[in-house]
Image (cartoon, rainbow, N blue to C red):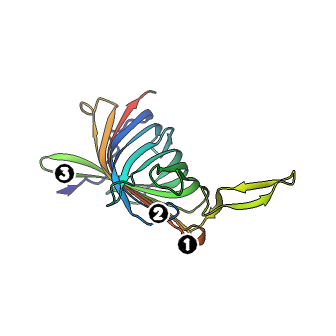
Amino acid sequence: MTLKAAGESPEKEIQPGIYLKIDQGASRGLLLDERMSNLHYEGWGGVLNFGRRAHRPSYIAEWSFARLQFNYSKPAHKNTVVENPGAGLRYRHLKKLDLSESYDFYAGLQANIFGNFRLAQRLGNSFLFADMVGELRPQAEIHVSSHFWSRNWYIELSAAASLFGYTVRIPEYGVSFELAEDGGVKIQGYEQQFLLPYNYAHVTTGIFIRESFGGNTNPNWFRIGYKWDYYTMKGKHSLNMNNALHQLVLELYFRVK
C-alpha cells in the first residue's frame, strides 16, 4: 500500500461542476428515550437522501433536501415495537486548505434541521414522541489516494460535531398547565430548550471509497462506505434521549451543469 505521489491530487477524477446526489442504504438503529420508556430499542431500517453538490477546486457546497430514514425497532420484549422515522434539511460549506501534498483537507460548517420521531402505538403512556432540532456543526474531511491490490483507491474520511442548537421536544414529561389569554387553561405538551455542549452532543463520522463511472472521461461518480450518526440529549426531570444509527450507504453523483 502506497500513498499518492507528491502533487497528485485525490480530486483529479472529480470534474468541477454541479452534481445531483442520491444516497441510499441500510441502517441499524440503537435507541433509548427515557420519556417514552426505560427500554433500549434496536432494529433495522433504511436511509434515502436527495441533494445538490457544487464541487469546485477550492470548496464544496452541498444541499441535502430530503434526508429520510426509517427504523423498525424493538427491545427484548417483542410487544413494544417502535417505528422510528426521521427527516431533515442540511447545508454544508467546506473550504479546501493546503496543508499537505499527501492528502486534501477540507474544513467548514454545516447547518442542520431535522426531526426524529418515535411512534409507540403499543405503549400506554403516549403514541408520539419527537425531537425537532436546528443546529450548527463544524465539519472536516480528508481525501487521500492509495495504491494497493494493483489499483488506485480514493478514500474519504469525514467528521462533524455539534456546536449549539435549539430543539422542541414532544411531549414534555407529564403535563403542565397555564392560564390562557381568555382566562381558561392552556395545556403545554412540549418542551423547548437551547442545546449546548453540556446537554447535547451530535457526532457524525464516515469513511468512503470513491470511484468514477466508466473511467476518467465520465464526470459521474459514486461513493460507498459507512456512517455513524449519534446524538444524545439531556431532558428535564433527568429523562434523556440517546440515538445511534449505523449506516451502510451508496452515494451516486450525476453531473448536471
- Report which quarter residue 19 is drawn in: top left
Question: Residue 33: image x %, image y %?
Answer: 48, 62
Residue type, label 2? Ser
Residue position for label 3: 147
- CA distance separating discs 3 and 1: 51 Å
Look at the image and tell me whether residue 157 can be seen: no
Tell me the residue at 31%/42% (across/down). 223
Residue type, label 3? His
- Report which quarter residue 252 is drawn in: top left
Tell me if 76 is positioned left or right of 136 in this view: left
Residue 171 vs residue 159, the one in the foreground: 171
- Report which quarter residue 70 is drawn in: top left
Residue type, label 1? Ser
Q: Measured along the vertical axis of the image, is residue 213 above or below residue 43? A: above
Question: Residue 152: image x %, image y %?
Answer: 21, 46
Residue position for label 1: 238
